[in-house]
Image (spheres, helix red, strand yellow):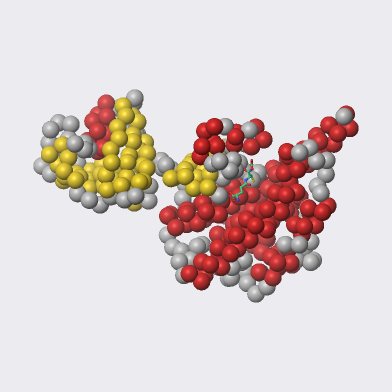
Amino acid sequence: MATSVADFNFALKMIALSFKARVRLVRNGDKYTYTTKYLGFNKSDTFKLGEEENITTTDGRKVKVVYTMDGNTLTEKQTGEKSLTWSEMASKPILYYINRSPPCRAVLMAAKYIGVELDLKIIDSRKGENRTPQFLKMNPQHTVPVLDDNGALILDSHAICSYLSEKYAKDDKLYPKDLVKRALVDARLHFDTGFLFARLRAFVEPIFYFGCTEISQERSDYFKMTLPIVEAFLENCQYVCGNDITLADFCFISTLSSVDRIIGIDAEKYPKTTDWMRRMSQLPDYENLNGEGASILQDAILAKIKENQEAAKSN
Ligand SMILES: N[C@@H](CCC(=O)N[C@@H](CS)C(=O)NCC(=O)O)C(=O)O
Protein backbone atom coordinates (compact mmCIF):
# COMPACT_ATOMS: atom_id res chain seq x y z
CA MET A 1 0.00 0.00 0.00
CA ALA A 2 1.39 3.41 -0.95
CA THR A 3 1.98 5.81 1.86
CA SER A 4 2.26 9.52 1.64
CA VAL A 5 5.52 11.41 1.23
CA ALA A 6 3.83 14.56 2.50
CA ASP A 7 2.65 12.75 5.58
CA PHE A 8 6.06 11.21 6.11
CA ASN A 9 7.88 14.49 5.68
CA PHE A 10 5.31 16.32 7.76
CA ALA A 11 5.83 13.87 10.61
CA LEU A 12 9.57 14.31 10.39
CA LYS A 13 9.12 18.05 10.25
CA MET A 14 7.52 17.83 13.64
CA ILE A 15 10.71 16.21 14.89
CA ALA A 16 13.14 18.68 13.33
CA LEU A 17 11.24 21.77 12.38
CA SER A 18 13.34 23.62 9.84
CA PHE A 19 15.46 20.77 8.50
CA LYS A 20 14.68 20.23 4.82
CA ALA A 21 14.48 16.78 3.28
CA ARG A 22 15.92 16.30 -0.20
CA VAL A 23 13.77 14.25 -2.50
CA ARG A 24 15.51 12.37 -5.28
CA LEU A 25 13.33 11.60 -8.25
CA VAL A 26 14.06 8.93 -10.82
CA ARG A 27 11.90 8.64 -13.90
CA ASN A 28 11.11 5.28 -15.41
CA GLY A 29 8.71 5.58 -18.37
CA ASP A 30 5.63 7.37 -17.10
CA LYS A 31 6.36 6.49 -13.48
CA TYR A 32 8.49 8.29 -10.95
CA THR A 33 10.18 6.90 -7.92
CA TYR A 34 11.14 9.26 -5.16
CA THR A 35 13.54 8.44 -2.40
CA THR A 36 14.08 10.70 0.52
CA LYS A 37 16.61 10.49 3.31
CA TYR A 38 15.85 12.44 6.39
CA LEU A 39 17.59 12.23 9.74
CA GLY A 40 18.51 8.65 8.99
CA PHE A 41 15.00 7.66 7.80
CA ASN A 42 14.71 6.37 4.25
CA LYS A 43 11.52 6.37 2.28
CA SER A 44 10.76 5.53 -1.31
CA ASP A 45 7.62 5.18 -3.39
CA THR A 46 6.55 4.95 -7.02
CA PHE A 47 3.76 7.00 -8.54
CA LYS A 48 2.46 8.49 -11.77
CA LEU A 49 2.32 12.26 -12.14
CA GLY A 50 -1.14 13.80 -12.24
CA GLU A 51 -3.04 10.64 -11.26
CA GLU A 52 -5.14 10.45 -8.16
CA GLU A 53 -4.06 7.64 -5.80
CA ASN A 54 -5.77 6.31 -2.70
CA ILE A 55 -3.36 6.10 0.18
CA THR A 56 -3.40 5.50 3.91
CA THR A 57 -1.49 7.94 6.06
CA THR A 58 0.63 6.84 9.02
CA ASP A 59 -2.18 7.81 11.42
CA GLY A 60 -4.65 5.64 9.52
CA ARG A 61 -6.53 8.29 7.52
CA LYS A 62 -7.59 7.34 3.99
CA VAL A 63 -6.80 10.19 1.62
CA LYS A 64 -6.36 10.77 -2.07
CA VAL A 65 -3.10 12.26 -3.35
CA VAL A 66 -2.01 13.74 -6.65
CA TYR A 67 1.64 14.31 -7.48
CA THR A 68 2.60 17.15 -9.81
CA MET A 69 5.94 18.51 -10.98
CA ASP A 70 6.72 22.12 -11.76
CA GLY A 71 10.35 22.42 -12.84
CA ASN A 72 12.16 20.75 -9.97
CA THR A 73 9.41 21.05 -7.40
CA LEU A 74 7.54 17.89 -6.56
CA THR A 75 4.22 18.63 -4.95
CA GLU A 76 2.05 16.08 -3.24
CA LYS A 77 -1.46 17.35 -2.69
CA GLN A 78 -3.68 15.42 -0.33
CA THR A 79 -7.44 15.65 -0.42
CA GLY A 80 -9.78 14.15 2.14
CA GLU A 81 -11.02 14.84 5.60
CA LYS A 82 -7.89 16.50 6.96
CA SER A 83 -6.15 17.71 3.87
CA LEU A 84 -2.52 18.70 3.84
CA THR A 85 -0.46 20.25 1.09
CA TRP A 86 3.26 20.03 1.21
CA SER A 87 5.86 20.51 -1.43
CA GLU A 88 9.51 19.69 -1.51
CA MET A 89 12.35 20.51 -3.86
CA ALA A 90 13.89 17.71 -5.87
CA SER A 91 17.69 18.03 -5.97
CA LYS A 92 19.12 20.59 -8.36
CA PRO A 93 20.65 18.96 -11.44
CA ILE A 94 24.27 18.07 -10.65
CA LEU A 95 26.92 19.09 -13.17
CA TYR A 96 30.22 17.21 -13.02
CA TYR A 97 32.65 19.65 -14.56
CA ILE A 98 35.90 21.55 -14.42
CA ASN A 99 36.11 25.17 -15.46
CA ARG A 100 39.20 24.88 -17.68
CA SER A 101 37.15 22.59 -19.95
CA PRO A 102 35.48 24.37 -22.91
CA PRO A 103 32.49 21.97 -23.13
CA CYS A 104 31.85 22.44 -19.39
CA ARG A 105 31.92 26.22 -19.77
CA ALA A 106 29.42 26.01 -22.65
CA VAL A 107 27.01 24.25 -20.28
CA LEU A 108 27.62 26.82 -17.53
CA MET A 109 26.77 29.67 -19.92
CA ALA A 110 23.71 27.91 -21.34
CA ALA A 111 22.40 27.09 -17.85
CA LYS A 112 22.88 30.69 -16.73
CA TYR A 113 21.06 32.00 -19.78
CA ILE A 114 18.24 29.49 -19.31
CA GLY A 115 18.03 30.32 -15.61
CA VAL A 116 18.48 26.81 -14.21
CA GLU A 117 20.62 26.43 -11.10
CA LEU A 118 23.14 23.61 -11.08
CA ASP A 119 24.86 21.85 -8.23
CA LEU A 120 28.50 21.99 -9.36
CA LYS A 121 30.90 19.13 -8.61
CA ILE A 122 34.49 19.31 -9.80
CA ILE A 123 35.99 16.32 -11.62
CA ASP A 124 39.65 16.88 -12.45
CA SER A 125 40.98 14.57 -15.14
CA ARG A 126 44.54 15.59 -14.30
CA LYS A 127 44.01 14.04 -10.87
CA GLY A 128 42.39 10.93 -12.40
CA GLU A 129 38.97 11.78 -10.96
CA ASN A 130 37.31 10.96 -14.28
CA ARG A 131 38.65 7.38 -14.18
CA THR A 132 37.26 6.25 -10.83
CA PRO A 133 34.87 3.28 -11.00
CA GLN A 134 31.98 5.52 -9.87
CA PHE A 135 32.62 8.11 -12.59
CA LEU A 136 33.18 5.46 -15.29
CA LYS A 137 29.86 3.91 -14.33
CA MET A 138 28.20 7.24 -15.09
CA ASN A 139 30.25 7.95 -18.17
CA PRO A 140 32.38 5.21 -19.78
CA GLN A 141 33.76 7.94 -22.10
CA HIS A 142 35.46 9.41 -18.97
CA THR A 143 34.75 12.97 -20.10
CA VAL A 144 33.23 16.00 -18.43
CA PRO A 145 30.69 17.50 -18.47
CA VAL A 146 28.10 15.01 -17.19
CA LEU A 147 24.70 16.07 -15.93
CA ASP A 148 22.76 14.09 -13.34
CA ASP A 149 19.23 15.44 -13.29
CA ASN A 150 17.68 13.58 -10.38
CA GLY A 151 18.91 10.25 -11.69
CA ALA A 152 18.72 10.96 -15.43
CA LEU A 153 22.31 10.97 -16.71
CA ILE A 154 23.01 13.17 -19.70
CA LEU A 155 26.42 12.95 -21.38
CA ASP A 156 28.12 15.40 -23.75
CA SER A 157 27.95 19.19 -23.45
CA HIS A 158 25.86 19.59 -26.60
CA ALA A 159 23.28 17.05 -25.48
CA ILE A 160 23.27 18.64 -22.01
CA CYS A 161 22.67 22.12 -23.45
CA SER A 162 19.76 20.86 -25.58
CA TYR A 163 18.31 18.95 -22.63
CA LEU A 164 18.52 21.92 -20.27
CA SER A 165 16.89 24.19 -22.82
CA GLU A 166 14.09 21.72 -23.57
CA LYS A 167 13.42 21.01 -19.91
CA TYR A 168 13.99 24.33 -18.16
CA ALA A 169 13.93 27.24 -20.66
CA LYS A 170 10.87 29.49 -20.67
CA ASP A 171 10.89 29.64 -24.47
CA ASP A 172 12.59 27.96 -27.42
CA LYS A 173 14.87 30.84 -28.45
CA LEU A 174 18.14 29.06 -27.64
CA TYR A 175 17.00 25.78 -29.18
CA PRO A 176 14.09 26.40 -31.57
CA LYS A 177 11.24 23.94 -31.88
CA ASP A 178 10.89 24.79 -35.58
CA LEU A 179 12.52 21.83 -37.32
CA VAL A 180 14.50 23.76 -39.89
CA LYS A 181 15.82 26.25 -37.35
CA ARG A 182 16.64 23.45 -34.94
CA ALA A 183 18.48 21.54 -37.66
CA LEU A 184 20.71 24.57 -38.18
CA VAL A 185 21.51 24.76 -34.46
CA ASP A 186 22.14 21.00 -34.41
CA ALA A 187 24.47 21.30 -37.41
CA ARG A 188 26.48 23.98 -35.62
CA LEU A 189 26.62 21.91 -32.43
CA HIS A 190 27.97 19.01 -34.48
CA PHE A 191 30.46 21.39 -36.09
CA ASP A 192 31.76 22.22 -32.63
CA THR A 193 32.05 18.53 -31.74
CA GLY A 194 33.60 17.39 -35.01
CA PHE A 195 35.70 20.36 -36.02
CA LEU A 196 36.29 23.09 -33.47
CA PHE A 197 36.57 21.22 -30.20
CA ALA A 198 38.03 18.07 -31.80
CA ARG A 199 40.88 20.08 -33.33
CA LEU A 200 41.47 22.06 -30.13
CA ARG A 201 41.65 18.79 -28.17
CA ALA A 202 44.10 17.44 -30.76
CA PHE A 203 46.70 20.10 -29.95
CA VAL A 204 46.03 20.38 -26.20
CA GLU A 205 45.94 16.71 -25.15
CA PRO A 206 49.49 15.76 -26.24
CA ILE A 207 50.75 18.46 -23.87
CA PHE A 208 48.69 17.36 -20.88
CA TYR A 209 48.96 13.63 -21.34
CA PHE A 210 51.92 12.74 -23.61
CA GLY A 211 54.74 15.02 -22.44
CA CYS A 212 54.85 17.18 -25.61
CA THR A 213 57.15 20.16 -25.21
CA GLU A 214 55.38 22.53 -27.61
CA ILE A 215 52.10 23.08 -29.41
CA SER A 216 52.28 21.18 -32.66
CA GLN A 217 52.45 23.63 -35.58
CA GLU A 218 50.71 21.13 -37.81
CA ARG A 219 47.82 20.66 -35.39
CA SER A 220 47.50 24.37 -34.72
CA ASP A 221 47.39 25.01 -38.51
CA TYR A 222 44.80 22.28 -38.83
CA PHE A 223 42.67 24.07 -36.27
CA LYS A 224 43.09 27.36 -38.12
CA MET A 225 41.53 25.79 -41.22
CA THR A 226 38.19 25.99 -39.36
CA LEU A 227 38.34 29.77 -38.93
CA PRO A 228 37.29 30.79 -42.48
CA ILE A 229 34.27 28.53 -41.99
CA VAL A 230 33.26 30.26 -38.76
CA GLU A 231 33.77 33.62 -40.50
CA ALA A 232 31.42 32.42 -43.28
CA PHE A 233 28.79 31.37 -40.72
CA LEU A 234 28.84 34.94 -39.43
CA GLU A 235 28.80 36.53 -42.91
CA ASN A 236 25.37 38.13 -42.67
CA CYS A 237 24.42 37.71 -39.05
CA GLN A 238 25.20 38.60 -35.47
CA TYR A 239 25.32 35.05 -34.10
CA VAL A 240 26.39 31.72 -35.54
CA CYS A 241 22.85 30.61 -36.47
CA GLY A 242 21.35 33.97 -37.43
CA ASN A 243 20.51 37.18 -35.63
CA ASP A 244 19.48 35.51 -32.38
CA ILE A 245 21.76 33.87 -29.87
CA THR A 246 21.38 30.06 -29.65
CA LEU A 247 23.04 27.18 -27.81
CA ALA A 248 25.57 26.98 -30.65
CA ASP A 249 27.01 30.37 -29.66
CA PHE A 250 27.83 29.09 -26.16
CA CYS A 251 29.51 25.98 -27.56
CA PHE A 252 31.49 27.95 -30.15
CA ILE A 253 32.61 30.71 -27.78
CA SER A 254 33.86 28.34 -25.09
CA THR A 255 36.07 26.64 -27.69
CA LEU A 256 37.10 29.73 -29.67
CA SER A 257 37.89 31.92 -26.65
CA SER A 258 40.23 29.14 -25.48
CA VAL A 259 41.85 28.88 -28.90
CA ASP A 260 42.27 32.66 -29.05
CA ARG A 261 44.22 32.62 -25.78
CA ILE A 262 46.39 29.65 -26.77
CA ILE A 263 47.24 30.11 -30.47
CA GLY A 264 45.54 33.43 -31.28
CA ILE A 265 42.79 34.29 -33.76
CA ASP A 266 43.87 36.94 -36.26
CA ALA A 267 41.42 39.85 -35.88
CA GLU A 268 42.29 41.32 -39.29
CA LYS A 269 41.73 38.07 -41.12
CA TYR A 270 38.59 37.21 -39.18
CA PRO A 271 36.83 40.50 -38.31
CA LYS A 272 33.33 39.03 -38.03
CA THR A 273 34.50 36.28 -35.71
CA THR A 274 36.37 38.86 -33.64
CA ASP A 275 33.28 41.12 -33.41
CA TRP A 276 31.10 38.17 -32.44
CA MET A 277 33.60 37.12 -29.76
CA ARG A 278 33.51 40.65 -28.36
CA ARG A 279 29.69 40.57 -28.40
CA MET A 280 29.64 37.26 -26.57
CA SER A 281 32.13 38.55 -23.99
CA GLN A 282 29.65 41.28 -23.06
CA LEU A 283 27.05 38.78 -21.85
CA PRO A 284 26.30 38.98 -18.12
CA ASP A 285 28.70 36.88 -16.02
CA TYR A 286 30.76 36.00 -19.09
CA GLU A 287 34.08 36.37 -17.24
CA ASN A 288 33.02 34.24 -14.37
CA LEU A 289 31.39 31.55 -16.52
CA ASN A 290 33.84 31.40 -19.43
CA GLY A 291 36.67 33.96 -19.46
CA GLU A 292 38.30 32.82 -16.22
CA GLY A 293 38.20 29.15 -17.19
CA ALA A 294 39.71 29.93 -20.61
CA SER A 295 42.58 31.77 -18.89
CA ILE A 296 43.04 28.88 -16.45
CA LEU A 297 43.31 26.51 -19.43
CA GLN A 298 45.86 28.80 -21.07
CA ASP A 299 47.96 29.01 -17.88
CA ALA A 300 47.74 25.25 -17.34
CA ILE A 301 49.00 24.60 -20.88
CA LEU A 302 51.90 27.05 -20.52
CA ALA A 303 52.88 25.54 -17.16
CA LYS A 304 52.66 22.01 -18.54
CA ILE A 305 54.79 22.89 -21.58
CA LYS A 306 57.45 24.26 -19.21
CA GLU A 307 57.25 21.19 -17.02
CA ASN A 308 57.52 18.88 -20.05
CA GLN A 309 60.51 20.86 -21.40
CA GLU A 310 62.33 20.59 -18.06
CA ALA A 311 61.57 16.87 -17.86
CA ALA A 312 62.87 16.42 -21.42
CA LYS A 313 66.11 18.29 -20.56
CA SER A 314 66.80 16.16 -17.50
CA ASN A 315 66.30 12.90 -19.45
N1 LIG B 1 32.14 15.89 -26.87
C1 LIG B 1 32.35 15.96 -25.44
C2 LIG B 1 33.82 16.24 -25.17
C3 LIG B 1 34.13 16.28 -23.71
C4 LIG B 1 35.63 16.27 -23.41
O1 LIG B 1 36.45 15.87 -24.25
N2 LIG B 1 35.99 16.69 -22.20
C5 LIG B 1 37.37 16.68 -21.79
C6 LIG B 1 37.67 17.94 -20.98
S1 LIG B 1 37.66 19.35 -22.02
C7 LIG B 1 37.63 15.51 -20.86
O2 LIG B 1 36.81 15.22 -20.01
N3 LIG B 1 38.78 14.86 -21.04
C8 LIG B 1 39.20 13.78 -20.20
C9 LIG B 1 39.32 12.47 -20.95
O3 LIG B 1 38.95 12.40 -22.12
O4 LIG B 1 39.77 11.50 -20.33
C10 LIG B 1 31.46 17.05 -24.84
O5 LIG B 1 31.13 18.00 -25.54
O6 LIG B 1 31.07 16.93 -23.67
At x 72%, y 62%, the residue is: 226
- 82 on left or right of 165: left
Query: Residue 266: x percent and y percent?
Result: 79, 61
Q: Tell me if residue 225 comes above or below residue 243 in the rendering.
A: above
Query: Residue 274: x percent and y percent?
Result: 72, 63
Quadrant where the C terminus is found in the figure: top right
- 210 on left or right of 74: right
**Residue 173 appears anywhere in the view:** no
In this rendered view, identify the residue nearer to me: 207 or 108: 207
- 15 on left or right of 242: left
Quadrant where the N terminus is found in the figure: top left
Q: Quadrant of residue 275?
A: bottom right
Q: Tell me if residue 120 comes above or below residue 290 in the rendering.
A: above
At x 79%, y 66%, the residue is: 268
Query: Residue 103: x percent and y percent?
Result: 61, 50
At x 75%, y 57%, the residue is: 223
**Residue 33 appears anywhere in the view:** yes
At x 71%, y 54%, the residue is: 199
Query: Residue 200: x percent and y percent?
Result: 71, 52
Residue at the limit of the structure toward the bottom, as seen here: 236
Q: In which quarter of the image is residue 206?
A: top right
